[in-house]
Image: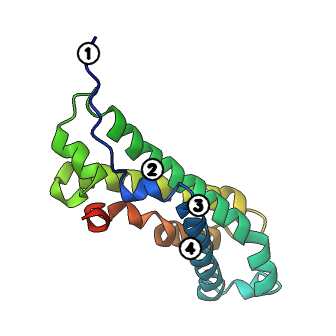
């Protein structure tokens, strides 16, 4: 029987965002950021012309924006988690796995994989908001496209790029 090697005793910071009690802070933080972005989009894209008022627009969209955003973040984190866990069995170099889990900027390929996971999350945020959240609220497709893209870019999981070593050492 092959001996089991356990490298990931310290979880990467992006992984900790999904565990209690940190998850509650993450959910609150995401809700606040999503709220600010939804409100900003209302004014930037002049949705008052299409919507009755900010309160109605906000109430009709914030929960979906928030939940879909969190789901997209979890999917992006799952990509990194799977690569981190299965990296050895996939034959990935140890410094790549270490870069993904602890210090993205120590390995160029780690940065690329993390950015890929962030872009997957951003694409999902865009799709969810364009096709579901704002489908009924914003009829004009070009405006809905701009709002969905803005929310996706601003709320994508930028924290994935934070080196875990900043928090453990």
Q: Is residue 159 above or below residue 132?
A: below
Q: Earlier in the sequence, mark 1 or mark 3?
A: 1
Question: Looking at the picture, how far across and down is residue 124, in whole percent?
Answer: 54, 53
Crowding at mark 2 (Cα within 10 Å: few <14, some 14-19, many 20+): many
Q: Earlier in the sequence, mark 4 or mark 3?
A: 4
**Mark 4, mark 3: which one is toward the viewer?**
4
In the picture of the structure, the residue carrying the numbered disc 4 is 29
Tell me whether circle 3 and circle 2 mark residues in contact (CB < 8 Å): no
Q: Earlier in the sequence, mark 3 or mark 2?
A: 3
Tell me whether circle 1 and circle 2 mark residues in contact (CB < 8 Å): no
Tell me whether circle 4 and circle 1 mark residues in contact (CB < 8 Å): no
Question: Looking at the picture, how far across and down is residue 56, in whole percent?
Answer: 82, 80
Tell me whether circle 4 and circle 3 mark residues in contact (CB < 8 Å): no
**Mark 4, mark 1: which one is toward the viewer?**
1
The mark tally for this picture is 4
In the picture of the structure, the residue carrying the numbered disc 2 is 77
């Amino acid at each position: 029987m092959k001996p089991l090697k356990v490298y990931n005793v310290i979880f990467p910071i992006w992984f900790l965002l999904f565990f209690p009690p940190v998850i509650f802070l993450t959910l609150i933080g995401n809700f606040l950021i999503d709220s600010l972005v939804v409100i900003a989009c209302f004014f930037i894209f002049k949705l008052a012309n299409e919507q009755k008022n900010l309160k109605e627009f906000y109430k009709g969209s914030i929960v979906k924006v928030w939940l879909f955003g969190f789901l997209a973040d979890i999917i992006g984190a799952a990509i990194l988690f799977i690569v981190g866990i299965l990296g050895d069995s996939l034959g990935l170099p140890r410094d790549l796995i270490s870069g993904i889990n602890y210090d993205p900027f120590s390995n160029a390929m780690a940065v690329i994989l993390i950015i890929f996971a962030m872009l997957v999350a951003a694409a999902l945020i865009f799709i969810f908001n364009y096709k579901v959240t704002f489908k009924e609220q914003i009829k004009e497709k070009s405006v809905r496209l701009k709002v969905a893209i803005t929310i996706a870019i601003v709320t994508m999981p930028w924290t994935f790029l934070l080196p875990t070593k900043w928090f453990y050492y």
